Image (cartoon, coloured by chain):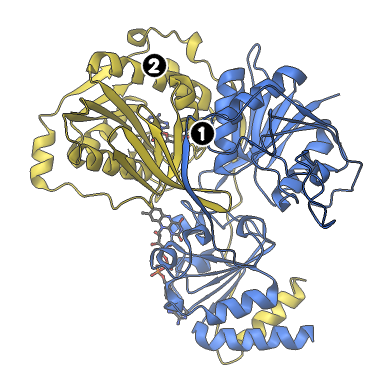
Amino acid sequence: MPGSLHIITLVKWVPDAQLERRIGADRRLERSEGILGELDEYPLEAALQIAENYDDAARVTALTMGPAGASAAVKKALQIGADDGVHLCDEALAGADIYATSTALAAAVNHLRVSGGAQQFVVLTGMASEDGESSAVPAQLAARLGVPALTQARGVVLNGEQLQVERVSGDRVQKVAAPLPAVVSVTDQANEPRYPNFRDMMKAKKKPVSALSLAELGLTAHGVESKVSLVEAEPRPERTAGELIHDDGTAGKQIADFLDKEGLL
Amino acid sequence: MTQVLVFFERVQEQLTPAQAELLTHADALGEVVVVTGSLPAAGRSGTGQSSTGQPSAAALAVQGVAGVLTGAEPVAAPILPPDPALAELIAAAAGELDPDLILGTDTPDSVDALAAAAVRLQAGLITGATGVTASGAATKTVLAGSWHTTAQISGENAGPLIATLRPNTASQPVPAAKEPDVVELEVAASSAVQVLEESELASSGRPALAEASTVVAFGRGVEGDLSLVEELADELNAALGASRVATDAGWIDHSAQVGQTGVTVSPQLYLSVGISGAVQQKAGMQTSGTIVAINKDEDAPVFEIADLGVVGDLNEVLPQLIEEIRARKG
Ligand SMILES: Cc1cc2nc3c(=O)[nH]c(=O)nc-3n(C[C@H](O)[C@H](O)[C@H](O)COP(=O)(O)OP(=O)(O)OC[C@H]3O[C@@H](n4cnc5c(N)ncnc54)[C@H](O)[C@@H]3O)c2cc1C
Ligand SMILES: Nc1ncnc2c1ncn2[C@@H]1O[C@H](COP(=O)(O)O)[C@@H](O)[C@H]1O
C-alpha cells in the first residue's frame, strides 16, 4: 500500500476574461465578479484522475486565496469533483504580489498537510492565473515548501510515489520525475476538464468548505507584505480596426501594396 | 554604478536573439555579470580542435559583460532546468555581487529559477516585463495586453528587483568585446528532479516564434494544408504561428501556438490567416506592430484589431500575395 495521499489543488477566483477587466483608481484590479480561473480546471482534472487511479485513500482539496467572493471558485471546484474546499481570506492579502501570495499559500498548504494527516501530499496548480499571468507562484510555493517544482506539465502521472511530468524546456521535450511531495503546474495540454452534471452539483452542496485567516496560519500582516506594488496603470489605447477590403480578385496585390507602403517587405 | 546580474538558463555556442537582447537592456542599466549553470566547451566550434573540457565564454564576449559566474562543473556536469540548484546558483551569485537588478529572459525555465531565487533572496519579482529601470521599476502589459502598468519594488530591505523581460523590447545588435573571465562557484547540479528522457523539438529552420520580426499565423481555415502559409512564411523570412485549433489538430507542434496558453508575440508584422480571433488568441498577438488578417467571414473578431483586413478565401488571396512579394523582391 502506498499510503494515503492528499492532493491540494489551487484554484484562483479571477475576473472573467471574456468581459472587460479594469484596474481601479486604487491601482487594484476590480474584483467584484469572478469565475474559477479556466486554467485552474486542468490541474483540478489532473488531481481527480490521480485520485481515481490511486491504490489507497486519496483526497482532493481545492484551496483558494482571495476576497469573500472567492469561495465561489471553491464551490465550483467541489461541483467538478474536489472532496473539500478551503478559502484563505484576509484583508491583509488584498493586492498581494507573487511573493506575498506564495508566502500565504505555502502557510496554508503546510497547515492542511498537518491537519489533513495524510502520509503523502502533492500540490497541483494552473500554468498561470488569468489576472496575475506571472506563472511564478508555483515555483515560489515549491521553494517555500522545500519540495521540487515540476512546472508546465503537458502531462502528469503518479507512478507509485514518483511523479512523472512531460514538459518543454527551451527547444527540448523532457520527461522528468520527482518523488512525492512536489508542486506540479499543469497546462491546458494535459487533459480535458470534465463538466459537472446535476448530480455532481447536488453532491457538492454537502461538501465542507472551511475558512482560514492569516492568524490561524500563524502569520501577521507584516509577514505577507508585498515586495512590489503597482505605481501606475492605464488602459492601453484600444487597437482600432483599420481598413477592411473585400477580395475582388486583387486582394493579394493590395496586401503587398500595403506592406510595401508600411516598409514591411 | 548599478550592478546588474543577468541569468541565462543555458549558454550554448551562440546566444539566442532573446539573450542578446537582454544583454542590450542590461548594458544600458549598469555593469553586467552573467550567471549560468552551463557553458559550452572551449576549442570546439569551427577550429576542428577537440574539446579541452574548459568552459568557453566566447558567446558572452559582448560589450558590457564584465564577467561570468557559473557552477562547479559547467561543461562536464552543467546545472540545467528544471534543476532547483539553478536557484541556489543565482542566490550564490547574488551573494557575491549584491546586485541592484537580476534579469532573465521571459521563458518558463528562467521564470522558475528566478522565482525560487527570489524566495531565497527575499526579493521582489516581476515577470514578463517590457522594460526596467535602475531604480527597480518595471513596465508590463497585463490583462491580455489591455493595460500598461508600472510596478516598483517597495518597502524596507526590498532587496534587488528580479525581473524577466519579454523579447522584442530592445534593439538587438550587441558590439563584440573581449571574452569575459569565468569564475566557478561552489554550487553543483542536484538530482532533486530526474530527467528521464529528453529529445529536441523538431526544428522548423524558421526564426523562433517569440523573437521573430514577422509572424505568419494560421488557424482552422487552412484545413490542415500548410503549403501556402509555409510558402508565405519563407518569402517573408517569418516564423510560423498557429491557433489552438490548429495545434490541437496536430497540424503543427504545440510550441507554435500563439495566445494565452501559447507564445506571446509582438512582431513588427503579424499576418493572421484563417483565424477567427478569439480572446485567447488575441491575448498573444495584439501588441504586434501591424496586423494583417485574411478571413472569409467579415464578422470575424480578428478584424476589430487588424490594420488591414481582407475578407476573402485564403486559397485565392495567398497565391497572389506570394507572387506579388516575389515580383517586388526580384
Ligand atoms: C483555456 C483556453 C485557452 C486557450 N488558449 C488559446 C491560445 O493560446 N491560442 C488560441 O489561438 N486559442 C486558444 N484557445 C481557443 C480559442 O478560444 C479558439 O477556440 C481558437 O483560437 C480558435 O481557433 P481558430 O481561429 O483557428 O478556429 P475558428 O474559431 O474555428 O476560426 C476559423 C476561422 O477561419 C475562417 N476560415 C475558414 N476557412 C477559410 C478560408 N478558406 N479562407 C479564409 N478564412 C477561412 C473562418 O471564417 C473562421 O473565422 C483557448 C481556449 C481556452 C478555453
Ligand atoms: N490567490 C490564489 N489562490 C489560489 N491559487 C492561486 C492564487 N494565485 C495563484 N494561484 C495558483 O498559481 C497558479 C499560477 O499563478 P500565477 O503565478 O499568478 O500566474 C494559478 O494557476 C493558480 O493555480
- Give percent across and percent down for residue B257: 50, 60
Quarter of the image holding residue B35? top right
Determine which residue is flagged by label 2. A107
Q: Which chain is blue in the rendering?
A: B
Determine which residue is flagged by label 1. A136
| Viewer-closest of B33 and B151 | B33
Give the residue at x 73% y 44%.
B40
From this viewpoint, is residue A193 visible? yes
Q: Amino acid at mark 1?
A: Ala
Work out whether B62 lies above or below B120.
below
Q: Amino acid at mark 2?
A: Ala
Chain letter behind tag 1: A
Q: Are marks 1 and 2 in contact (CB under 8 Å)?
A: no
Where disc 1 sits, the SS reads loop
Quarter of the image holding residue B212? bottom right
Give the residue at x 65% y 67%.
B206
Residue at disc 1, CB closer than 8 Å to ligand 2: yes
| Viewer-closest of A29 and B207 | B207
| Viewer-closest of B93 and B240 | B93
Specify few, some or many for label 1: CA neighbours under 10 Å numbering under 14, 14-19, or 20 or more.
many
Dividing the image into four equal quarters, which quarter contains ligand 2? top left
- Give percent across and percent down for residue B92: 67, 21
Rounded to the nearest whole Å, what is the CA distance between mark 1 and mark 2? 17 Å
From this viewpoint, is residue A229 visible? no
Q: Which chain is yellow in the rendering?
A: A
Work out whether A74 lies above or below A119.
below
Which tag, 1 or 2, sits closer to the chain's start? 2
